[in-house]
Image (spheres, rainbow, N blue to C red):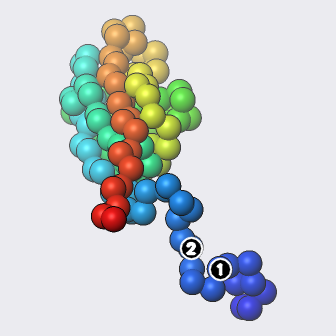
Amino acid sequence: MASVLAGWPAGGWQPSAGQDQRPAPQRQFTVEAKKYAFEPARIEVEQDDLVTIRLSTPDIPHSFTIDEYRIAKRVVAGRPVTFEFRADRPGTFRFYCNLRQDERCREMHGELVVHRRKQATHPE
């Protein structure tokens, strides 16, 4: 076991100077995909949050796709899907349904907004 820990600092992991020392929170959202919209259509988180999404649909199959995060999850009625990802880059990212069984599904879209995490202030 010592060989596995050989490169680990004696005091454990420590953030470098200027790095936020607060642990990133886990953010949970329930997203419903149905003809022909996502609810909610806007998800806002902070950079480095661990985002958990429970995706469901009451009707036809849908997907939740965010190209920049390489996410493409498919859901069918009665079988919700839960997945998570780290929101590691700030910006506004479009999510959409990429299934082609119904032309109107292509109109379904929303946005993931990832805000820059504010730096922790340290008392002097």
Location of residue 116 by image quarter: top left
What kind of element bears circle 1? loop
Residue appearing at x 72%, y 91% in the figure: 1
Task: Report the amino acid beneath label 1.
Answer: Pro
Compared to residue 20, the image places residue 95 above or below, namely above
In the drawing, does residue 49 fall left or right of residue 11? left
Residue appearing at x 29%, y 34% in the figure: 43
Q: Which residue is mark 1?
A: 9
Where in the figure is residue 103, as x and y percent of width and height? 39, 8
Structural distance between the alpha carbons of marks 1 and 2: 7 Å
Task: Report the amino acid beneath label 2.
Answer: Trp
Compared to residue 108, the image places residue 93 above or below, namely below
Front residue of 46/70: it is 46
Q: Is residue 60 visible?
A: yes
Where in the figure is residue 72, as x and y percent of width and height? 49, 34
Where in the figure is residue 67, as x and y percent of width and height? 53, 27
Location of residue 77 by image quarter: top left
Mark 1–mark 2 contact, CB under 8 Å? yes
Looking at the rendered image, the quarter that the C terminus falls into is: bottom left
In the drawing, does residue 58 fall left or right of residue 90? left
Q: Residues within 10 Å of mark 1 (few under 14, many from 20)?
A: few
Q: Residue furthest front?
A: 124
Compared to residue 10, the image places residue 59 above or below, namely above
Residue appearing at x 49%, y 56% in the figure: 19
Q: Which residue is mark 2?
A: 13
